Image (cartoon, grey):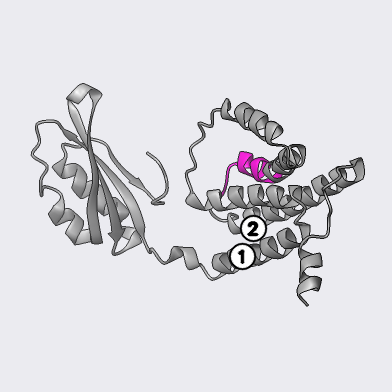
Amino acid sequence: MKEFMSKQLQFLDISHITMEVALKTLGISLALTLLISLVYIFTHRKSGFPSSMIVSILLMGPIASIIVVCIGSNLARAISIGGGLALIRYRNTIEDPRDLVYLFLSLATGMACGTGFIGYAIIAISLILIVLIIANVTRFDSFGGNTMKLSIIIPEDLDFYGVFDPVLKKYCRSFSLLRIKTTDYGTLAELQYRIKLKNIAEQKKLIDEVRERNGNLTVTLVRKATDNY
């Protein structure tokens, strides 16, 4: 049994790279990342997603498999490729932490295929994708309720301590002050709260009452706690 599982988990010998092996590795990696991309589209069909994420998920796996196959067990190649990759600067901000799961899953797919663990990649990725689909269908990721981020701009000379607490207690089940920062060369300040609304339909009432206390300056309510300002 142990020998059978071992053969299933690693059925592609890449100790001697040939064109057939390289193409097979690349093809299987691409097929698995395509499956990951389809699951990503399914789980984000309601919230929407940037099209660039689909391309990133689709190609990250095959690219990783190419790198792993090229490196093999050669230490010099590993150092040279690692040095080349270190020159690349990644500046994209991931707005939704769930996107990282799909990116890392695509990367792990490429690494597993590149090292020859095709069977293991198919089994592990299939199980993870099933879990992601179940979590999406059962809305497992929505247990946070009506959690949002509230940004309030106030004059720099306003003593903000406790000013907005009565309003927040009225409309929120819970709230906490996350950050305080000055803007517009110190003439204004920005308060950022994480709040959980009692009633999602009372967003406008909350904003109107906050504006009465901050001098009718800008108030921003972000629907998703993972969004950036």
In the depicted structure, whether residue 212 falls above or below residue 134: above
Marks 1 and 2, the one that precedes in the sequence: 2
Q: Amino acid at mark 2?
A: Phe
Residue 6 picture location, percent across and down: 77, 67
Q: Position of residue 73 (x, y in %)?
A: 73, 42
Residue at 53% of width from left, 32% of height from top? 90
The tag on residue 193 is none
Residue that label 2 marks: 42
**Which of these two is toward me, 15 or 165?**
15
Is 184 above or below relative to 139? above
Question: Of tags 1 and 2, which is closer to the observer?
Answer: 1
Q: Secondary structure at mark 1?
A: helix
Q: Nearer the viewer, residue 193 or 105?
A: 105
**Residue 68 is covered by the magenta coloring:** no
**Label 1, label 2: how far apart the Cα atoms are:** 8 Å
- Residue 195 image point, x, y percent: 28, 55
The relative height of residue 34 versus residue 228 in the rendered view (above or below) is below
Q: Is residue 28 left or right of residue 38?
A: right
Residue occupying image coordinates x 57% and y 46%: 49
Callout 1, which amino acid?
Ile
Question: 124 or 77, which lies in front?
Answer: 77
Read off the residue under disc 1: 133
Q: Secondary structure at mark 2?
A: helix
Please give left or right for residue 8 compared with residue 83 in the image.
Answer: right
- Can you give x and y, in whole percent of width and height, for residue 67 in the image? 72, 38
Report the span colored magenta: 48-58
Task: Give the left or right position of residue 45, taking residue 16 as reference.
Answer: left
The image quadrant of residue 185 is top left
- The quadrant in which residue 32 appears is bottom right
Q: Residue at x 58, y 27 (%)?
A: 88
